[in-house]
Image: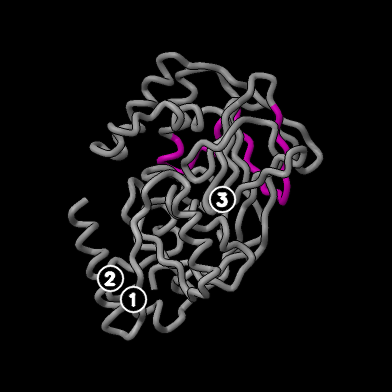
Amino acid sequence: MERSRCQVQTLVRALSDLGVSVESIPTQYPGHATALAETAMRDGVDVVLVCGGDGTINEAVQPLVGTGTDLAVWPCGTANVFSKEIGVPANPRALAEKIVRGETRRISVGVAMKPETGWHRYFLLMAGIGLDATIVSGVDSRLKKWTGVGAYLLAGVDYLARLPQTPFSIDFNGNVYESTFAVIGNASRYAVWFTLTPEARIDDDKLDICLFNTGSRIAYLNYAFQSLAGRHTLSSGVVYQWTRKAKADSKSGALVQLDGEVVGRLPMTFDILSQALNVVAPAVPGK
């Protein structure tokens, strides 16, 4: 935590040294990043810089989608999947220079919706239905603060011990599938060690869907090990396709997570907004 704080201070100083006016405001409560981003837009800010994890980034991006305001990120969270996906430089000074140069790229954004209520929420990385959302809902926030990824591993072990089943159906490309766990990926990376939608690209106009359908602990463990080697899409009980829209429903009220945060229960519809957000990042990640 102290290292992240020092890096943020270095980033702010680097921006100030380059002539950029910076106002640094810490978040105080869940949803605060959304309110801060909305205020920044009303004030005519050119770039909203988020120093945080994937959940905080997801909050901040909600009012930015479809606007001309750029998003910049500095990774300070548990997994920092989004920053890896877009190739955020490892040096704060390098990121500051990209911000000053206006070095941006357009990326696509996923959206989860409940048409019957008008509710919607954007996601940058993925939507997860069933297994992973249930695991996320069981993560102890205090333990997460101190152990980071370890809190998710413990919640995963607890899930496998209990193996609660929340089956659901998902409709896309003219077919309806039964599933116990689905990842709807806008990006290839999923978590620290896992890449569940390897063919997904954050700047195309598609959503990659990876479906798992099993009630077996052994099968889930096998999927996890296979995914580490990138072979899970070839496993029995797995469906992998791309689409532009999907609709999921569940009699058991399966949970849904977006970018690692639980947002509600099915039914939901999922869509893609092509080239809907400017992010400060190299045209080719890692450059």
Task: Give SS at disc 2.
Answer: helix
Q: Are marks 3 and 1 in contact (CB under 8 Å)?
A: no
- Distance, label 3 to label 1, CA atoms, is 25 Å
In this view, the mark in front (2 or 3):
2
User: According to the image, label 3 marks what residue?
Assistant: 123
User: Label 2 amino acid?
Assistant: Leu
Residue at screen point 34% across, 80% down: 97
Front-most of residues 155 and 231: 155
User: According to the image, label 1 marks what residue?
Assistant: 96
Instruction: Residue 150: tell me if it is visible.
Output: yes
Q: Earlier in the sequence, mark 2 or mark 3?
A: 2
Residue 89 magenta-drawn? no
Against 27, residue 165 (above or below) is: above
Query: Where does residue 33 sit, x and y in percent of width and height?
Result: 45, 54
Q: Is residue 267 left or right of residue 57?
A: right
Residue 128 marker? none
Q: Quadrant of residue 76?
A: bottom left
Against 137, residue 85 (above or below) is: below
Query: Where does residue 55 sit, x and y in percent of width and height?
Result: 44, 47
- Distance, label 2 to label 3, CA atoms, is 26 Å
Q: Residues within 10 Å of mark 2 (few under 14, many from 20)?
A: many
Q: Earlier in the sequence, mark 1 or mark 2?
A: 2
Q: Are marks 1 and 2 in contact (CB under 8 Å)?
A: yes
User: Label 3 amino acid?
Assistant: Phe
Q: Residues within 10 Å of mark 1 (few under 14, many from 20)?
A: many
Against 211, residue 63 (above or below) is: below
Q: Which residues, given as a range, are shown in magenta?
A: 226-249
Front-most of residues 32 and 96: 32
- Distance, label 1 to label 2, CA atoms, is 6 Å
Screen quadrant of the C terminus? bottom left
